[in-house]
Image (spheres, coloured by chain):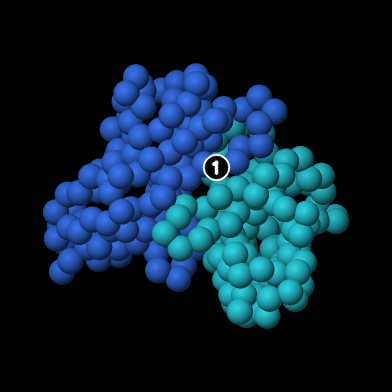
């Protein structure tokens, strides 16, 4: 399967714990995005990587959130000291660079539940 | 800042019928792209159709077509000959045009479409 894959698919954690999610983009895609989707809402942009460089972060990304893409391939999103408000679906997407309007390919997401 | 509004939280259509999903957006940009994405239950989001703002011709992909009204900032999706597999959440999304932009998507809140047999 050459699509975007995310791991784990589901994560239940206790409030205050740290969690880390992984995203493997389509191999030739140099652009990688993280979005957060809560119930009844559309996905909201969190952060963007071009290769290994994190070029944009949303104001939604508090200092408890950190994302990396160390070799320009897979990416990780870590949430420290989780709060109940962090419960959401975390989506990863990747796309080719170049001209605008390129299609973003999404993974199936990681559903986080903070109890 | 750009915003995308989908005013129909849920819609229902009979199999083989035609349905139109509405989307309006607000932007001061002149160069941008609009998208409709489909998110089936428990499956990943996939692109349905894309429209470049500088193109006057409405985009079409098989049974899916759009009505793009740039002056009105309206971008509706028409699904013809609806099929059971079209049941999904549909998101309208905006992307700024290229020019150092991140190509991030700004989504509406979605319309849940149910196709009835």
Residue A97 falls in image quadrant: top right
Q: Is residue A2 left or right of residue A71?
A: left
Residue B71 percent coordinates (x, y): 34, 19
**Label 1 residue SS:** loop
Q: Residues within 10 Å of mark 1 (few under 14, many from 20)?
A: many
Q: Would you place residue A89 above or below residue A56 in this image?
A: below
Residue pictured at 37% horizontal, 58% vertical = B89
Q: Quadrant of the N terminus of chain B?
A: top right
| Badge count | 1
Percent position of residue A72, x then y: 80, 52
Residue at (41, 33) in percent of width and height: B25
User: Which residue is the site of mark 1?
Assistant: B105
What residue is at 70 percent from the left and 69 percent from the top?
Answer: A82
Tell me if residue A67 comes above or below residue B60 in the rendering: below
Is residue A104 depicted above or below A66 in this figure?
above
Tell which of A83 and B64 is nearer to you: A83
Whether residue A39 appears in this view of the structure is yes
The outermost residue toward the right is A70
Which chain is painted in cyan? Answer: A
Q: Position of residue A13 (x, y in %)?
A: 67, 79
Which of these two is toward me, A15 or A53? A15
Q: Is residue B61 visible?
A: no
* Quadrant occupied by the C terminus of chain B: bottom left
Image spot of residue A35 (x, y percent)? 60, 54
Q: Residue at x 59, y 75 (%)?
A: A113
Q: On the rendered structure, is B84 left or right of A111?
A: left
Q: What colour is chain B?
A: blue
Q: Chain of mark 1?
A: B
């Amino acid at each position: 399967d050459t699509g975007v894959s995310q791991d784990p698919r589901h994560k239940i954690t206790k409030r205050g714990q740290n969690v880390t999610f992984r995203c493997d983009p389509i191999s030739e895609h140099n652009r990688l995005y993280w979005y957060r989707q809560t119930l009844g809402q559309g996905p909201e942009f969190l952060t963007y990587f071009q290769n290994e460089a994190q070029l944009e972060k949303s104001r939604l990304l508090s200092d408890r959130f950190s994302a990396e893409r160390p070799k320009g391939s897979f990416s990780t999103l870590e949430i420290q000291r989780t709060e109940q408000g962090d419960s959401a679906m975390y989506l990863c997407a990747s796309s080719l660079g170049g001209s605008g309007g390129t299609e973003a390919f999404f993974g199936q997401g990681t559903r986080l539940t903070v109890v | 800042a750009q915003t995308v509004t989908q005013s129909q939280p849920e819609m229902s259509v009979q199999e083989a019928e035609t349905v139109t999903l509405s989307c309006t957006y607000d932007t001061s940009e002149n160069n941008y792209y609009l998208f409709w994405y489909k998110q089936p239950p428990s499956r990943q989001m996939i692109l349905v159709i894309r429209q470049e703002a500088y193109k006057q011709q409405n985009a079409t992909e098989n049974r899916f077509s759009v009505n793009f009204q740039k002056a009105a900032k309206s971008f509706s999706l028409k699904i013809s000959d609806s099929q059971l597999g079209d049941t999904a959440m549909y998101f309208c999304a905006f992307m700024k045009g290229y020019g150092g932009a991140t190509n991030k998507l700004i989504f509406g809140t979605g319309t849940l479409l149910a196709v009835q047999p």
